[in-house]
Every structure is written in C-alpha cells, then in structure tokens.
Amino acid sequence: MALTIISLMKQVPLPSEMRMGDDGLMDRTKAKSIINIDCAFGLEAGLQIKADNPDAKLIVCSMGPPSFNASLKKAISLGYDEAYLLSDRRLGGSDTYATGLAISTMLKHLGYGKGLNEDFVIVAGRQTSDGDTAHVPSQVAEFMKIPQGTFIETASLVDGRIHAKRIIEGGYQMMSLPLPCAMSFTPTGITPRRSSLSGAIKSNDTEIKMFNIDDVGLSTEFIGLGTPGESGSPTIVSKVATIKSERAPAKMSTGHGEKALVADMLENFKSGKNTIEVKEKKAKKVKKIDDSLRVIDFRNGASGILTWAEVVKGQITRPSLELLTPARNLANSLEEGTKVTSLIIGKNVGELAKELIAHGADEVIVIDDDRLEEYRILPFSEAFAQVIKKNNYEIALFAATTAGRELAPRIGVKTDSGVTADCTELLIGEHVHRNRETKERVVYAPILESRRPTYGESKLATIIGFVCPQISTARAGTFAVPERDENRDGSITTFTPTLDEGEFVSDIIETVIGEAGGAALFEADIIVAGGRGTSSDDMKLVKDLAQALKDQGINTEYAASRVMVDEGVIEYAKQIGQTGKTVRPKVYIAIGISGAIQHVAGMKESETIISINQQATASIFSHSDFGIVGQYEDVLPELIEQVKAGFTFGIKAN
C-alpha cells in the first residue's frame, strides 16, 4: 500500500487584523487571511517526505468557511494532489476538542484510521496564530487512536518508521514513530517553498471537495458553541475583558552617537523611571446573583484537584511546582477537605513525592515503572486517564511545557473534557445560564474559571467547561513556587496502570538536555533578550552583554523572542512570551524586539524594562521604563564597555 501524507491546514486572519467580537469569538468578517505560519511548515514537511517517497499521495484537509478554498488551492499549487474542506455553519464556535473531533471524523470518512495496517502520516503546524493552543494535533491523534509527535523540527521515513527530531525544554529528542502517526511541526525546519507556475495552473484545474457534517456522519452533540447541560463544545468563552497597561511613559535617551545615547540612558536610570499617578480605584460592585435561581452542581460527585509533576533529569520541574500555588488556592475556595493530589510518573521517582508534599500537595500518587523513565505521550496519557477515571477529579492542571501542551489535550479526549491553554489566572466562580427551550435561568457552581490572554494579549478571556475533570494548562513562570514546609503531612500511594504493548510503539532514540527547562531564567536578576533586530550576528552581542554582567557577579541570563527561536538562532527553552516563558526579573533588557504583544506578555511584569531598537516608533517603547533609539551593532558594544567599567543597572553582585 502506497504511503498517504495528510496535511492539516488552517487559514487565519493576519495578526494585525485579528479582532474579537463581543461574544469572545473571532470576528473574521473584515480580516484578510493567510495560511497559518506554522501550517506552512507542516505543508513543507509533507512535501519533504514525499520527495523521498515518490509513490506517496499528498492530500490536504481543513475545516472552516468556504473562503478557506484559497489556502487549499495554494497547497495544491505547492504539490499536493487532493484537497478537502469540512465547512458547515453548525461548526461555528467549536473549541479545540470539537475541532479535533470534526477533523478526525472527516479523515475517517475519507477512509483513514480504521484500525488496519495503514500507511499514512498526518502532518500539521505546531499551533495557530489565532489560538496558540497547540491542542488540535494531539486531539486528532487521540481521536484517530494513533501515536504522535509534537514540536517536531525535522522528520523522514526510514525503513517504514518516521525518525523525527522533537524540540523540548533545554534540548531535543530523537524519536522513532510507527505508521500511522501524527506530527506537528515547529517553524524551525526547512523554509517553505513557493508555488511554481505549473503548480499554479494545476491548482486552478483541481476541485476542492467540500463536505458538511452530514456528509461525514458527524452529529452536533459535541461541536459548535457549547451550551451547558445541552450540546456543543465542552468549553465556552464566558466573558472577555480588555487588558490595559499601567506602565508610565519611558525615559528616552537623547544625544548624538552611541556614546552619548548610552551615557544619557545611564543618567536616566540613576535618576529613576517615570511614574504615573495611581488613582484610587473604586471598588467594583459585586453583581449579586438572584438567590431564587436554581443552583446546578454539574460535577456528578467529582472532587479534588490533580496536578502533573513532570520530571526532567531526575528532578521535578519548576513549572510543575508552580502548579501547586493555584491548585492550593482552588482547593481552599472549594468545599472544606478538598484535596490537592499530584501524580508523578517515572523510574525511581518515589523519593520525589516528599518534595511535592512539602510544597503543598496533600497526596502524591506514584507510578514507578522502568519503562516510563522518560516521558512518552502514549503510556503517560493512558496512565493519567486511568488515575482520573478511578478517582473522579473535578480539576486537572498541567504546566504549559512542550510535554504538558500535548499531554493535556490528549487526556482531554480520553476523558471527554475540554482543555484551556496557557492560563494566567485560575479561579472558582459561577456561571448563569438561560435554557433556550424552557427559558429558565440557572446557576452552574462551583465552576473553574480559566483565564488566558488571547488575541495578541489584548484581551483576557475566561473559559469555562461543564465536564469533569475541568482541564487547564498554566503558563510557565506565571505562578510562584509555594514555600517549602518540611513539616507538612501528606499521603503517598502507588498506582499500577494497565499498559499494553500498544502504548510503547514509539521509541525515544536519544534525549539531549542542557539546562533542564531553562529554569535559570526564573531566578535571574537581569535578563538580556534579543529579537529580530539582533539577527545580524545571531545574537552574539546580546550574549556578550549577558556575559559581561555575569563577569561582574550579576545573576544574568540571555533569552529571545519567538522569531529567534523559530529561525533556529536560539533554543526554545530561552523563549519569552505567550508561548514561551513568563519572567519577572529585576531588570529586563529588550534588544531589537519590536514589542509584539505576544512577547510583552512574557516580560511585562519585570520590575524595570530597558529597550533598545532602531525604530523610534517600535511599540516596545510603550512597555518600557527606559529606551534608546539606535543601531544594535553600535549601541551594544558601548553598553558592554560601561558594564565592564562597573555599571550593573543597580543590581549588586552576588
């Protein structure tokens, strides 16, 4: 049987034209659209696999309005053979669970995923720019019951198996996946090609096959806009708030030449940053819910909060410990006696359970299995799902690491739960709903309110779900690690999951990890970060400035914006921003960074922000305390000399 390469693709609004409607959903009516950037790399990955397997068939699939035909035609012009679009108004408002279900149902309708010895591979982009969840590839893989690899950089078919390089915090893994399988690709692989003239002609003559949900046999039970207690997606956007910056205008350096600019910045720094008058905020009136409304406890007996304690190089990762802060707060907001339980999986990990209890867990469940020494998505997700089904938790929390961002959505499918990605706030609240048929207004409570910045960090969306466990991932660096208390009491139990050989069909060939997870960024007093404007020397001067500060005894780390990671200049562990890490150093120096709000999301809580950019109109200056308009190659050497002479931005040596 010849290989079939299936590329999943999405058309998204241009980032500059992304808009959110009052209902919290994307308003595409006036936005120009393009192929999602990450999807372009997924398309290219499929073409690369085809190049080594000439008999392979290439098909591209998408879900969306008829306007998506334009992007599907583009895929045909690149070399794809067939294109399919699932388009139906009843899909509007679908969350990622519903999207994964819909796409997988279409693929099964096309004849794939029937459980036979099939030779097909699904390729996709890492995530989409209008959501940035990275959930759908994992959810499609689980619905199709096939292995997966996410955050893949390169892949090739070798002796009937896919050999792939997967990016992880602090390094990479070399994986071997059987067919069929699914992979999502980072924008760090081979640059996507352009259409040829013959390809463009071919695309004009190729029909895009369109389906509606009736054609593929998809019911409306779990798709579309979710309705509590009725039908639709398991999660909904309950409310949306505008995010406003409260940082005072930056002090901008003046002078002719880099020496004068740097000297003026030093003087500005010594005199202190600008301040704004903080007006006393009027206490918001708490909207009182009518006591006469019927309260619905949708949990069906579910109780307790479960967190995943990810282990890297024999240590619990910092983001996993951070989870215990919101978990503890949520437990305190629920019924008395609500427990926080942490699940730890690995080889010889029992001793680490005491650390979790010291940081706030009431109970630790240990799965100790030699086969699980390294994280592997299939056995870990199956083990996790078995623990959830046995103990019936109401909430499950994961850190939004590369592992957590693929594990949570796969578990969500196994438990028929929705998942909210990259949360910065987790609260217990209540939701008022009016039944469409009976017109009765009822209150769903208690319910998890998962809040995540979205649409370029300009809005804070509150997501709620009505299926337990309510699952969320938390952005790394958002929450503090709870203080360690060696006197805390807690229980430690073991669990032995039922895992068959089918959970171990994917192999880890090699794991290379330097600094485990880039944890040093969370502890640094100063972070020097580079963006696109530092590409001329691959961030060498950025690293030199960080090293000069280290030589002065200052706890300093270098980092980067997403574009430098996507271009392969720096590893993912060093990425700051919405899909990277959130940091709060005493001083953050942003160099050559334009100020895209996705990056600002990860550094805006820094105590002091200094920006250097050649564009006077760069939006980064609106989020800074001090600024220099100047050429990277000119300003940095002078600033490095000042550091070598003893200037350390007010930070004392350790």
Image: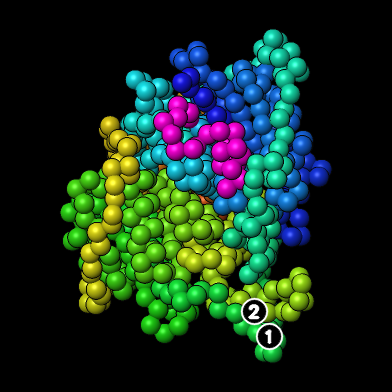
* Residue 443, label in figure: 2
Total labels: the figure holds 2
Side (left or right) of 534 relative to 34: left
Instruction: Residue at 64%, 24% (x, y): give it.
Output: 82
Identify the mark nearer the N-term, 2 or 1.
1
Q: Is mark 2 on a helix, strand or loop?
A: strand
Q: In the image as oriented, which residue stretches furthest toward the top?
A: 198
Q: In the image as oriented, which residue stretches furthest toward the right?
A: 30
Side (left or right) of 533 relative to 24: left
Image: 355 above or below 454: below
Image: 532 above or below 244: above
The magenta stretch spans which residues? 101-121
Residues 529 and 35: in front is 35
Instruction: Residue at 48%, 28% (x, y): give it.
Output: 120
Label 2 to label 1: alpha-carbon separation: 7 Å
* Residue 439, label in figure: none
Q: Which image quarter: residue 81? A: top right
Residues 234 and 651: in front is 234
Do the CB atoms of the residues marked 2 and 1 lie less than 8 Å apart? yes
* Residue 293, label in figure: 1
Residues 590 and 156: in front is 156
Q: Which image quarter: residue 52? A: top left
Side (left or right) of 506 relative to 530: left
Residue 117 colored in magenta in the image: yes
Image: 623 above or below 466: above
Residue 53 seen: yes
Q: Which image quarter: residue 523? A: bottom left
Colour scheme of the picture = rainbow
Q: Residues within 10 Å of mark 1 (few under 14, many from 20)?
A: few
Q: Where is residue 78 in the image (x, y as percent from the top left)?
A: 63, 19
Q: What element carries label 1?
A: loop
Q: Which amino acid does label 2 sit on?
A: Val
